[in-house]
Every structure is written in C-alpha cells, then in structure tokens.
Image (cartoon, helix red, strand yellow):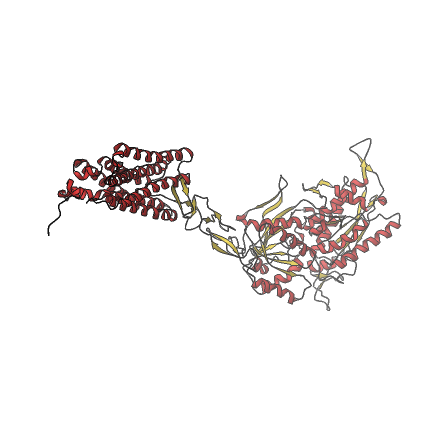
Amino acid sequence: MLGGIFPVFNKEESRNVSFQTEPPGANCIGFDLRAYRWAQVMMFAIKEINEDHSLLPNITLGYGIFDSCASPTNTLRAVFTLLNKQEIKAASPCHPPMSAVIAESGSSQSVAAAGTLGPFSVPMVSYFSTCACLSDRTKYPTFFRTIPSDYYQAKALASLVKRFGWSWIGVIQSDNDYGRNGVLSFTEEVKKYGVCIAFIGTVLRTYPRSKILEVVETIKHSTAKVILAFVPEGDLYPLMKEVVMQNITGIQWIASEAWITAARPSTPEIFHSFGGAIGFATRKMAIPKVKDFLLNINPFADARDPFVKDFWKIMVGCDPSKVKESSNSTDPLSSIKVCTGHETLDQTHVFFNVTQLRVAYNVYKAVYAIAHALHHLIFCTDDNDKNHRKPCINNLQIEPKEVSNQLQRVNFVNSFGEAVFFDKNGDPPPSYEIINWQLREGEVQHVTVGHFGTSANASYELVIEEDSIIWNTGREIPVGVCSEMCPLGTRKAEIKGKPICCFDCIPCADGTIANTTGAADCIPCPREYWSNEGKDRCIPKEIEFLSYYDAMGIALTVISLFGVCLASAAMVVFSYFRNTPIVKANNSELSSLLLLSLLLCFLCPLTFIGEPTVWSCMLRHTAFGVTFALCISCVLGKTIVVVTAFKATLPNNNLARKFGPVQQRIIVCSCTTVQIFICVLWLSLKPPFPDKTFKHSDKKIILECNTGSETAFYTVLGYIGLLSAICLVMAFLARKLPDNFNEAKFITFSMLIFCAVWLTFIPAYVSSPGKYTVAVEIFAILSSTFGLLFCLFAPKCYIILIKPEKNTKNHVMGKLPKKRL
C-alpha cells in the first residue's frame, strides 16, 4: 500500500481514493486483506485527525491510496503517478501539493520509492519496511519509518541465539533487499558470539517449485536443527507448504517480524512442522474505534472504492455488482451468489480483530507523525500569547523539504501513551515483543513470552519468560550445535575444512586443565600444582624428599646407626686394650681421634634424611666437610708416622725424632682448620638453603638442599680429595715395610677404596634425580667410612680379640724366630 497525504484549508475535503494505478487484478495475485485493512486504518487515522480541533485546526487532510501489489515496479508506477498529480495540482492555485507519502510494506518497494522521492525532497514514512539499508541518509535523505530497523532486529535475534546457546544455525532469506540485508546484519552480529551459519537458502514467492524443493532438500540434509527464516510471509508460504507436505519436523524455527504474527500460515496444518516457532514482532496495540470504522465498509455506500467489491466477495460471499431481490438467486455464469443488499459483515472474522494491531498500528503512527510535522510547520507561536499558535504559511507554500525537516524533529506522545519520534537516521527506538507459536484449543496462538528494547542505561535488554515457551521439542530447549559441547577435561580442536563450530574434543595435556565445559583452550596449572586424572582441576604436586619413613630412608638410617655401633665398639676395644703392643704400635691417640671422626662420619647421613630446613641444610654440608677433613687428617697423620718410622731405620736419619705427638696434633688441627675456614666462608657468603626443584619430575616437587655456592661445595670436596690423595701417595711409598703388621698397606687400600667411592660419586650425584641424589651422597659417605673402618681397624680388632697370641711386641716388630725345617 502506498498513500499520499495532502493538507487542505477550510475543511474542503479532497478525497481521491484509488487502490492501484491499473484496474484491479491487472498485476496483483489475489486480494490482500492485510493491505486493505492497512489502507482502512490510514483512512481512519486521517478521519480522526480531521475531526480533532487541536491538531491541524481548520485543515483537512486529503489522501490518495494505491496498491503496489508488493512489487517494486508497481511501487515506482504509483510514485510517479503521485508526483505527476502533484505537478498538475501545483500549477493550479486551488490544489495543495502532496506533503508526504506513507509506504511501503516491503523493503524492496521502499528502496525503489525512497530512492525516487529523495531527489524531490518528499518525505516518506514506512510502516513495514525494516531493511537497515534504508537508514542510509546519503541515499535516502527523506525516509522515515515507524517500525524498527533490521539493525535492531539482528541484535535481538543474535541475543536470542546467544541466550539459548545455539551455535549452528541454518538461514532462509528472501531474494530481495529485506532478506539479504537482514541476514547480512544477523550474520555480523552472531559472529561476535561464535555462531556459525550452516547454510543459507534463498526463496521468493515467484520462484518455480524446483527452486523451493532445492531449499527443502538442503534443510533435510543439514545437521542444523535451528533455522532462522528472514523472509516475508508471502515469500515463505510456498516453502512452508513444501515442508509440511514432506513431513519435515524436529526443527526449531526462528522467525523475523515479517511472518511471526501473519494470519495465513498460522494454521494447525502448518503448525505440525512450524509449531514452537519463536521470533520478534513489533509492539501491538488495540485501537477499539477502528472496528466500527471497518464494520461500516459497504460497497453500496461507497462505490468509489475499487477494491470494496473484492473485499465483499471474500467477507460475505456474494457479488455486489448486481443486486437481486432474492438472496438465494445466483448468477448462472458464476458460482458466487448475487448480493441482495441486506448482507452484513461477520464481526468475529480476524479482519475485525483490532485488539492486537501491529502493522496497522504503525500505519496509524505514521499518519499522526506526518500530521504533527504539518502542524508545527503551518502553525507558529503567537507573539502576544505564547500558548496560542496561529497559521504562518499557506498550504500552497508548503515545501516537502520543510515537512521532512519537521518530521525529523517530531516528538509527541500519542493517545495510547507511546512516545513517537525518529532518530537521526529516521528510525524509531527499538521495541519488540517475543512471540511463540502455541496450539491452544485447536488454534494457533501468538503468545508473548518476552520483550527486547533499550534499557535505562541505553543498552539493549532481552527479557524472556522461559517457562512460558513451548518449543518444537516441548518444554526442553532445542539443541542447535554442530558438535556437542566438550566435557570437563577436554578442549576444542578445529576440524580442517569445517567451520569453527564443528570441532573434536581432545583431552588436555598433562599439567593443564579445562574446568568448564566447551573450553577452547586448556589452562596450565600453577607451578606447584598438577592436573588430576580427569584433567578438570589442579591438585598439589606430590612433595618428595628422603624421609625417615620410606624404605630407603629407613635402610640408610639403620646402616648409619650400625656403623656408629661398629665405630663405638672399636673405640671400646682400643680403649680397653690400650696397653697392648698392637694398640701402642698404632698410635693410640691418633687411632682414638680417628675412631671418633669415623663415628661422626657415620652420624652425618642422619642430617641428610628428613625434610630440608635452613639449619639442616647448613649442618649437613659443613658437618660432612669438617668430619671427613678431620678423618682424613688423622689418616694423614698416621701415614706420616708410618713413613717416618720407615725412614728412621735408615742410617743418620733423625726424622722420627722430629715428628712426635705434638707435630701430629699440629698436622691434624691445621688440616682440619683449613676445612673449617672454607666452611665458615661458605656459610657467611652464600650458605646452603632448602629449595624446591621441578626439573626432575612434572608431577613431583623435590625438596632438596641447594648448595648455595657450588664453588664452595666443590672446594670442600676437592680439599678432602687432596688430603686423601696425599695419604694415598705417602702410604704407597711405605707399603713395603718389613714389619709383620704393615699399617701402610691397610692405609693404601683404605685410600684406594675412599678415592674410588668419591670418584664414582660425582657422576652418580649429578645424574641422580630427586631424593636419589641425597641417597647417593649418603651411600658415598657410608661406603667410604666403612672402608676406612674395616681397612684400618678390623685387622687390629681381629688380632686383639681372636688372635691374642699375636698381640706381642716381637710379632708386631716382625722378630719372631724362624721355624726349623
């Protein structure tokens, strides 16, 4: 429908009622009751304004109405007809110019009309054209509308899709500006939420059935179970019939405002496949007075209405062209009854239901918006009375551009309490109702289940009563995904060649988790945590250290204490038999000090077992270094004693006299003092400290003692190695003493064991992971200590306890008589 509005002074009503530019039926397919009602509402609104003494007083609005048949071509023909009439009237001083145009029901028609009217500055107000492209002021400078732009509907649809978690959606679009631009806007919006479009099917009411069937096949073979139809009702209806005919069910349909409240598809038959459809519709309003106006339509009262005859045929079922006296008479050439002139309209018909007007209400608002713009243009404020407005210009002086400027500034509250105004693009504020198709008592009802609009803070707000919705699947929200959401402990993995919504779910790697469903990436656990078996939460890593409670710790502790017992027993034996020749011959003072140092060496491993602390870390390394330095110093002292004793047997050699007990104490003390000095520097500058190591195992935290200064650590070991090397060399030189009990041989053997143990310790220490590093160090300490104890004291204890007959001076000095043959 396309209508032009003309203001006329002095209540001289000018009515030029024509519903199309050519005879009825020339280009239109059937009679559109909806368009006819919209035209009637426009006429009602103009009549109401003409009877209003406050709005456009003493001015009557005239109109010309044309039916475009939903065709851009017919729309252009109607526009040019109106413009031609305007030129004819403009040439006559008695006829007012056209002030504005109300059109159109389709976006493609409005694009054609607005593009033509724009250069002439004629304002155009649409009641049902929603394409966002029409908001472009550079192309359509005089276009306005009372229905929200698809820019907002796309946002509303995207919010709906996001709300219910649909990420895999099929789309049906109409092959026109409305469908293409609407789907483009929707696609851009849903991409922000990671939604993928499974397919896009295109339909049009003029398409052959083969093209419709191609779209139906696409729907049947697609995995998308949620489909948006951004299509006018007239273009979608052929597809709907095919879907029902092929019994395609199980699809949740999302509707645009163009068909969600349409009457023709709202039947139980269509509901079988489209039941539970949900979509957005413009605000509805009840205009009670319109019903009486519609009921007064009568072909016998107003013959100038060219479509009233078609309307009467549909509503009453008779042809008003010829009137006969008998109501039962029929035309022999027609199956339609001939009217008697006494027929009445059925008030229960949906045509007369004015309680839920949506598009018709937009027509009503459009008429009033133009009336208010004309009012503010024609009337200005009286200088003497600011509250009184008087005519300022003649109706023949009205320029369409001025009407357009006034429309841009229109802002009023209509009789229904709704504010009517336009933004800078000529669009009204967005306001939608969410409609759900439900079957009640055998009839399809359009149930309002929510709304969408701007909130107080200017943001968009979606409010839905989910419990009131009946879906295609019943009360359960339909699933619209290409791949099921990944469970906890897994992440999405894209499938090559498919959209991002189609993916595989793969388990998270060790040390990472996914604690939400549908995670795109796995989250690494903190350093001291590790992923559990399900990879859905981080758990503390196992803490590992050589404990007194594990098997290795218990075994090493037992061996260490066993060594302490052996060293103590040897001390008791040497103390008890201190006056025997073998004890005296081996320097009882150095032997006792050596046994004490060996006992301390056996106790050192106990500081290595247990959870490392600051004090235990400092104690274990320094105690180990000092006790072993003392031990090797004592061995070095004994070695020097043996060597000097051997040298004393040589002529003119007084070395043994110069190397007495004092010198032995000095050697032991000085050698030990050097190690103590190194350890003091170590503790002062960079002491050992407890540390957590993560490099040996991903699932464990190794508690160990960091040496602090590796230089100091290896200096301590190197110093012990230097002392043991000196002992080894000196003992090797004195290995051939003539005594029966040659201690140099035992010292040499003990030093060989000692050096072998610590040389193999270094690579084993470096390569051992975790608590085994500590175990290797303890093993080296115990092995070398046992080696010294057994090599130096086991032979002597054996003679003292088992072979006391050999514990004599002669036997020790090797002066026993030779056996005779």
Quarter assignment of residue 787: top left
Quadrant for the N terminus, please: bottom right
- Classify 688 as above or below 122: above
Q: Is residue 316 left or right of residue 542?
A: right
Identify which residue, 298 or 73, lies in the foreground: 73
Q: Is residue 507 left or right of residue 216?
A: left
Q: Identify the residue at the far front of this view.
A: 652
Residue 418 image point, x, y percent:
67, 42
Q: Residue at x 28, y 33 (%)?
A: 663
Quarter assignment of residue 623: top left
Q: Identify the residue at the far top of this view.
A: 384
Identify which residue, 3 or 210, lies in the foreground: 210
Q: Is residue 626 visible to the viewer in this orientation of the structure?
A: yes
Quarter assignment of residue 665: top left
Q: Is residue 355 visible to the viewer in this orientation of the structure?
A: no
Q: Is residue 617 left or right of residue 820?
A: right
Q: Residue at x 89, y 50 (%)?
A: 91
Identify which residue, 340 or 636, lies in the foreground: 636
Residue 443 image point, x, y percent:
58, 56
Residue 556 image point, x, y percent:
28, 44
Q: Residue at x 76, y 59 (%)?
A: 73
- Classify 718 as above or below 276: above
Residue 153 image point, x, y percent:
64, 50
- Classify 406 as above or below 295: above
Q: Identify the residue at the far bottom of this view.
A: 333
